[in-house]
Amino acid sequence: MKFEYLLFNLIVIVGPIVSQFNQQIRHISQWRLKFLTNGIVMIPYITWDVLVTGSYWWFNETYTLDFRLLRLPIGEWFFFITVPYGCLLVWETLSDAKLSTRLKPLRHVRTVLYVALPIGVWVFSTGKQYTGLVLICVGLVGLIDTLLRTELLMQLKTYIYIGIVFGLILIFNGYLTARPVVLYGEAYQMGYRILTIPIEDFGYGFTLMLFNAMLYEKVFNFTLRRNNRRVKARYLLNCPERTDRNN
């Protein structure tokens, strides 16, 4: 079916839409922040996608609509909206105080990820460009976690989240590569696969979803602090007597 990739995205987004009725999930009132986060992270990944389509990978015309935007089928554009949004919903369900506790031994994970940066540059120079770029992005996960001070890599919930994301990659990417909706240029990757999925795709998904989670937490916490300041300011304005006592 020509619209199969588009249908795939519609199926993926069903979960988040249904979850809108679950008032216990924080993301209901934060859907704007999620789309903002997705949009920001989407820019470098879409740019990457546009630049390498036709070499690193390409799309089977049997399962994609003929319409292309910057050489990408419309289903690919929706992929960068539906999948990260759905994964942020998973992230929200893990927003438990105990799971968010920072564990000091996990601080060394960032150091390990830093090592992926020079290795990725070297692998890229050998011609395995997809593999190299994925390793560079893995290294950037550690760097951005440090720069944004989100410390997600020190939290237990991050590793539960990664496990769930890997499971989702097996399901959804497994479908896309088994049909196949997406085909790959073997010259640009190591050639190792888990089932029908190139191992690089797991790193690609790992970085895409963690970048979204990191930026979302940063934006969410910033918005929360700003709103708290506004509430406090309104309270003080409405309580002049208390303000006078404090002065």
Image (cartoon, rainbow, N blue to C red):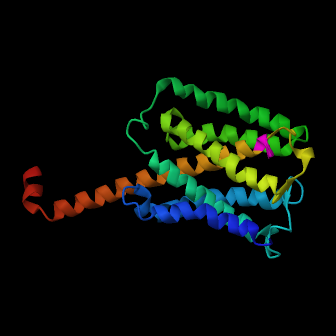
In the foreground, 28 or 146: 28
The residue range painted magenta reads 195-200
Tell me residue 9's x, y (percent).
Answer: 66, 64
Tell me residue 187's x, y (percent).
Answer: 93, 45
247 sits to left or right of 179: left
Residue closest to the far bottom:
67
Task: Locate residue 43: give its quadrant.
Answer: bottom right
Q: Is residue 246 above or below residue 72?
A: above
In the foreground, 137 or 75: 75
Which residue does the image show at 86% across and 55% down from the upper left? 183
Q: Is residue 103 above or below residue 32?
A: above
Tell me residue 200's x, y (percent).
Answer: 77, 42
Task: Locate residue 38: give its quadrant.
Answer: bottom right
Tell me residue 63's x, y (percent).
Answer: 81, 67
- Location of the N terminus by quadrant is bottom right
Residue closest to the far top:
105
In the foreground, 238 or 65: 65
Which residue does the image show at 10% across and 62% down from the upper left? 240
Asked if the stretch drawn in magenta spans residue 197, the answer is yes
Which residue does the image show at 90% across and 37% down from the upper left? 126
Which residue does the image show at 14% across and 65% down from the upper left? 238
Asked if the stretch drawn in magenta spans residue 56, the answer is no
Task: Examine the rendering and report whether any part of residue 39 can be seen.
Answer: no
Q: Is residue 156 above or below residue 130?
A: above
Q: Is residue 233 above or below residue 211?
A: below
